[in-house]
Amino acid sequence: VISPGVRQCDAVSEIYSSLIKGTPEFGGDYASIVPMLPTGKGTSASHLTWTDDKFVEGEATIIELSGSHKKYHCPMARTILLGKPDQLKIDTMKKTNEALQAGIDAVKAGNTANDVAQAFWKILDKYGIEKTSRTGYSIGIGYPPDWGEHTLNISKGDMTELKPNVTFHMIAVMQFGNWGVEASESIRVTENGAELFCNLSKDLFVK
């Protein structure tokens, strides 16, 4: 539904419909945060929502939203680019996803939030990418205005131990002045590693 000439608000109306409809087995609740949809230069800022402007060919859009059932939340983010492939954005998305995967690979019961953060930032440091904000936070039951639980942060120095069934949203958003890309995953900690709640490519979607 995100295409050049389509109004952002019309796209979000379709997104909301799907989120509330849910699946044949589980209907959807309202999420604690509205879908976030920064577009164009707006991708360099966090938590922007939609307008009635139309999508423009050549611009990227970050989609961050959450399914919700009985107030449990499962947020995720992906980035879509309308028009011709932009190699800089494609390469940056690959580096972002490499860092995200390194963090995910460090998730297992007994490790700490700091362990995950260190694995994530090791990749960013390799590519000279600077990120000062946290890269994840605990999730579970949420009510407006936030779906975060505020019990742990995936950031350097957070020594909170990861225990089985801890869930968190790991976010990899990179912002560069007037553009940005993002991918994220909702994760459950197990004894053997990370279980992802979503099964969707994290690559830059070029449409």
Image (spheres, rainbow, N blue to C red):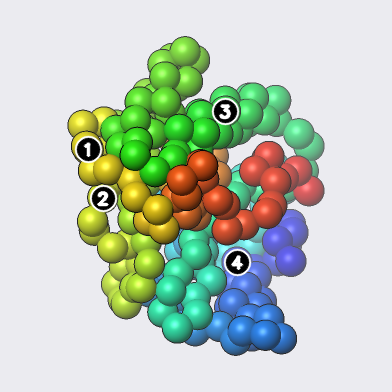
Residue 138 found in image quarter: bottom left
In three-dimensional space, the C-alpha distance between marks 2 and 3, rounded to whole angstroms, equals: 23 Å
* Residue at (52% x, 33% y) in the render: 105
Q: Earlier in the sequence, mark 4 or mark 1?
A: 4
Residue 135 at what x, y percent from top left?
37, 40
Q: Identify the element where label 3 is drawn.
A: helix
- Image depth: mark 4 or mark 2 in front: 2
Q: Amino acid at mark 4?
A: Gln
- Image depth: mark 2 or mark 3 in front: 2
Q: Amino acid at mark 2?
A: Leu
Provide the residue designation for mark 4.
8
* Residue at (49% x, 84% y) in the render: 29
Q: Is residue 19 visible?
A: yes
Q: Is residue 168 visible?
A: no
Q: Identify the element where label 2 is drawn.
A: strand
Provide the residue designation for mark 3.
98
* Residue at (67% x, 30% y) in the render: 90
Residue 161 at what x, y percent from top left?
27, 43
Q: Nearer the viewer, residue 47 or 101?
A: 101
Residue 146 at what x, y percent from top left?
31, 68
Provide the residue designation for mark 2.
152
Provide the residue designation for mark 1.
158
In three-dimensional space, the C-alpha distance between marks 1 and 2, rounded to whole angstroms, equals: 7 Å
Q: Earlier in the sequence, mark 1 or mark 3?
A: 3
Q: Is residue 44 left or right of residue 87?
A: left
Contact? badges 1 and 2 (CB < 8 Å) = yes
Q: Identify the element where label 4 is drawn.
A: helix
Q: Identify the element where label 1 is drawn.
A: loop
- Image depth: mark 4 or mark 1 in front: 1
In three-dimensional space, the C-alpha distance between marks 4 and 3, rounded to whole angstroms, equals: 30 Å
